[in-house]
């Protein structure tokens, strides 16, 4: 069974949005590394002072190893992520339902 994972990270949302445009190639490389590590789906959302990451991974442990990588954490900080407080991470078992799409 796969895992659904959300990460709510405080940060500079304007800087993050600009980085999505200016550093698209770097985001693509991170995405490829994620897929190689077991990521199945990935999306971002932006809120007031935070970025939300919504992922599906084959196994939660794969996400934990990927997200804990110091190189990835340096990248997160360079695109606006605030490391002064830990992110809110929620890990759940993905379940199928008749109404999913």
Image (cartoon, grey):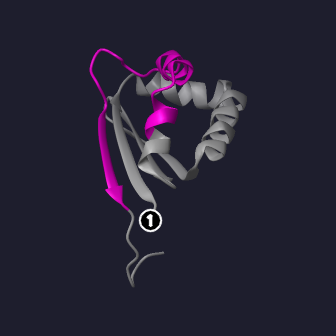
14 above or below 2? above
Q: Position of residue 22 (x, y in %)?
A: 66, 24
Nearer-the-camera pick, 84 or 13: 84
Q: Name the quadrant of the N terminus.
A: bottom left
Q: Position of residue 42 (x, y in %)?
A: 53, 49
Is residue 74 rendered to the left or right of residue 53? right
- According to the image, label 1 marks what residue? 1
Q: Residue at x 60, y 31 (%)?
A: 20
Residue sitting at the far right:
25
Q: Position of residue 17 (x, y in %)?
A: 52, 30
Q: Residue at x 43, y 76 (%)?
A: 100
98 above or below 35? below
Nearer-the-camera pick, 13 or 81: 81
Is residue 33 rendered to the left or right of residue 98? right
Magenta segment: 64-93
- Specify whether residue 91 is painted magenta: yes
- Specify whether residue 11 is painted magenta: no
Q: Residue at x 72, y 30 (%)?
A: 25
The residue carrying pointer 1 sits among few (fewer than 14), some (14 to 19) or many (20 or more) residues within 10 Å by Cα, namely few
Is residue 91 rendered to the left or right of residue 41? left
């Amino acid at each position: 069974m796969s895992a659904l994972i959300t990460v709510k990270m405080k940060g500079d949302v304007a800087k993050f949005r600009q980085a999505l445009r200016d550093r698209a190639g770097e985001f693509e490389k991170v995405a490829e590394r994620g897929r190689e590590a077991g990521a199945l789906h990935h999306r971002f959302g932006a809120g007031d002072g935070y970025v939300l990451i919504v992922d599906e991974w084959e196994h939660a442990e794969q996400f934990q190893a990927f997200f804990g990588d110091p190189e990835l954490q340096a990248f997160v900080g360079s695109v606006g992520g605030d490391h002064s407080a830990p992110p809110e991470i929620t890990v759940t078992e993905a379940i199928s339902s008749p109404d999913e799409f």
